Amino acid sequence: MEWRAVCVADVDALAELLGRDEEATVGRRESGPAEARSMLAAPGLDLPSRTWTASGPDGGLLGFAALHPAPQPGELRAQLVVAPSPDAPAVTATLLDRLDVWAAHDLPTPDTPVTLYQLPGCFPHDQLLSRGWTVVNSSSRLTVDLDAIRLPDHPAPAVRAARNETDLRTVHSVLNEAFADDPEHPHPDFDAFHHAQRRRDGYNPDLWLLAELDSVPAGALIARDPVDRAWIAWFGVHPAHRRHGLGAQLLTTAFSLLHTRGHRTVGVDVDTHNTGAMQAYTSAGMTLLGAADQWRRTYV
């Protein structure tokens, strides 16, 4: 067994590892090179020092781990993928040891949480529990085939793209108001939020959308369009302006813009328990692809 850091040339091998893990866990392969590329391009991830992988005699990857800043300011996000093999228990233990070492060095404070997403019934489940990781939430992934749904012929009258920094700040403000009651939602100031968005693959201020009701900002959406697949990154409607169809207008406008830019599919990750958001996405034509458990560990 060979241990080393990964590099961008490992995209196909990592995609194959993801596929084997998914096939063993949920019975089908859902990820490919696009997902592998996204993992390696995570903002703040230093490939030489914060990734570790094991490969077998045939050169195929047996496991992968990484640690990098989470989208929530001040938190860390771990990545862990292990495919079934006779060496899987030892591979899992070594990768978790490496995550512990990295976390001890990178945590800004001992009580800073580290999060990790895993498929339900994942192979590392028992080892994660034994090391103090706990499941705290569930996230669902939905996708839409833009060629299979009817897209509007004209822009939604209540929706427009952000035109300048003032509009970008308004998008940020509306999203904060939309998630004001969500304890899991971070509330960084605009500069920190915008800096984090600019570091994400596919950042494009032309895809920051505002929905207005009687000229009052009422909803917002941020989409990203990396080469491989487009994503809905942020989406929310102010509580006082819900049930006016603004969410549907934001989503269909985003779908149309992304289709015009050459995308055929759009994905989104959403809190499984957020029934309002799940209904908004499915009503717009998105379908459930699968779910993942959110694990968390605090090193205190």
Image (cartoon, helix red, strand yellow):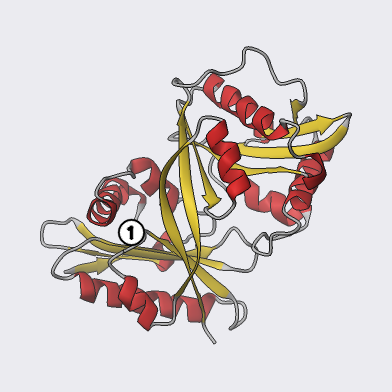
Name of the residue lying farthest toward the left:
57
188 versus 228 height, above or below: below
Residue shown at 72% from the left, 39% from the top = 220
Amino acid type for the residue under numbered disc 1: Val
Closer to the camera in the image, 162 or 134: 134
Image location of residue 26, percent across then percent down: 28, 52
Residues packed near mark 1 inside 10 Å, few (<14), some (14 to 19) or many (20 plus): many
Image location of residue 151, percent across then percent down: 56, 18
Q: Name the side, left or right, on which 253 lies relative to 269.
A: right
Quarter-wise, where is residue 90 in the image?
bottom left
Q: Which residue is mark 1?
A: 6
Quarter-wise, where is residue 55 in the image?
bottom left
Question: Can you say which quadrant of the picture contains the C terminus?
Answer: bottom right
Residue shown at 78% from the left, 30% from the top = 163
Residue shown at 61% from the left, 16% from the top = 152
Q: Name the side, left or right, on which 84 lies relative to 69.
A: left
Question: Can you say which quadrant of the picture contains the N terminus?
Answer: bottom left
Name of the residue lying farthest toward the bottom:
300
Quarter-wise, where is residue 277 in the image?
top right
198 versus 264 height, above or below: below
